[in-house]
């Protein structure tokens, strides 16, 4: 199995998320992460979905998603065709800063940064690949952690954006 990033472009329609997720559910495919945001094209939203599948399975899945009403176009990419990151937030006890430089050393070692310092806790931010954010989590568990949250993958496609090419071809076909 490989890790693939699926991008789905659509207008912001109520119920579309449910329909897209149901395609995965019907096929018994686990979604590793999902993010949704506006795209570079005004009025168009982009779903970024990460799955672990064989290429033939992901090809069929994307074809099925493409058939959904309100989906403009869906694509899939392997790890070499994208640039991606995640963000993670960690809440640790303020006491972790006392009694040595352990927490400070961890923050430096993992290239993280402090977002907020309160009397009871400190909030730390780390961006990177999942392995990077997980490594900091593992180290923080050794000294104490109150809370942890990680975003889904956000990704930019290395090839020029295929949606723009697709929309241009549709527009050209409609005008001829």
Image (cartoon, helix red, strand yellow):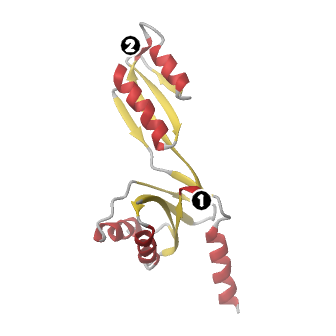
User: x, y (%) of residue 103?
Assistant: 46, 18
> Label 2's element?
helix
The answer to whether residue 174 is left or right of residue 4 is: right
Can residue 159 be spotted in the picture? yes
Q: Residue at x 69, y 89 (%)?
A: 175
Quarter the N terminus occupies: bottom left
Q: Which residue is mark 1?
A: 81
Q: Relative to residue 159, is residue 172 depicted above or below?
A: below
Q: Say the numbered circle drawn on residue 95.
A: 2
Secondary structure under the numbered disc 1 in the rendered image: helix
Expressed as whole percent of the image width and height from the top left, the position of residue 86 reads 50, 44
Q: CA distance from mark 2 to mark 1?
A: 43 Å
Q: Nearer the viewer, residue 133 or 123?
A: 133
Residue at the far front: name it. Answer: 1
Of residues 5 and 166, the one drawn nearer to the viewer in this rendering: 5
Which circle, 2 or 1, is nearer the viewer? Answer: 1
| Residue 80 place in picture, x, y as percent | 58, 56
């Amino acid at each position: 199995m490989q890790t693939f990033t699926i991008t789905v472009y659509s207008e912001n329609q109520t119920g579309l998320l449910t329909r897209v997720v149901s395609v995965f559910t019907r096929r018994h495919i686990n979604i590793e992460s999902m993010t949704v945001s506006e795209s570079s094209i005004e009025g168009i939203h982009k779903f970024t979905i990460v799955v672990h599948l064989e290429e033939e399975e992901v090809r069929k899945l994307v074809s099925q998603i493409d058939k959904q009403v309100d989906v403009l176009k869906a694509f899939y990419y392997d790890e070499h065709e994208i640039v991606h990151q995640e963000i993670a937030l960690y809440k640790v006890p303020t006491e972790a800063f006392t009694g040595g430089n352990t927490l400070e050393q961890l923050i430096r070692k993992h290239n993280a940064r402090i977002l907020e310092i309160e009397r009871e806790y400190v909030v730390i931010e780390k961006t990177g690949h999942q392995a990077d954010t997980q490594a900091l989590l593992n180290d923080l568990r050794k000294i104490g952690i109150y809370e942890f949250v990680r975003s889904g993958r956000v990704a930019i496609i290395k090839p020029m954006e295929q949606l723009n090419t697709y929309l241009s071809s549709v527009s050209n076909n409609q005008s001829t």
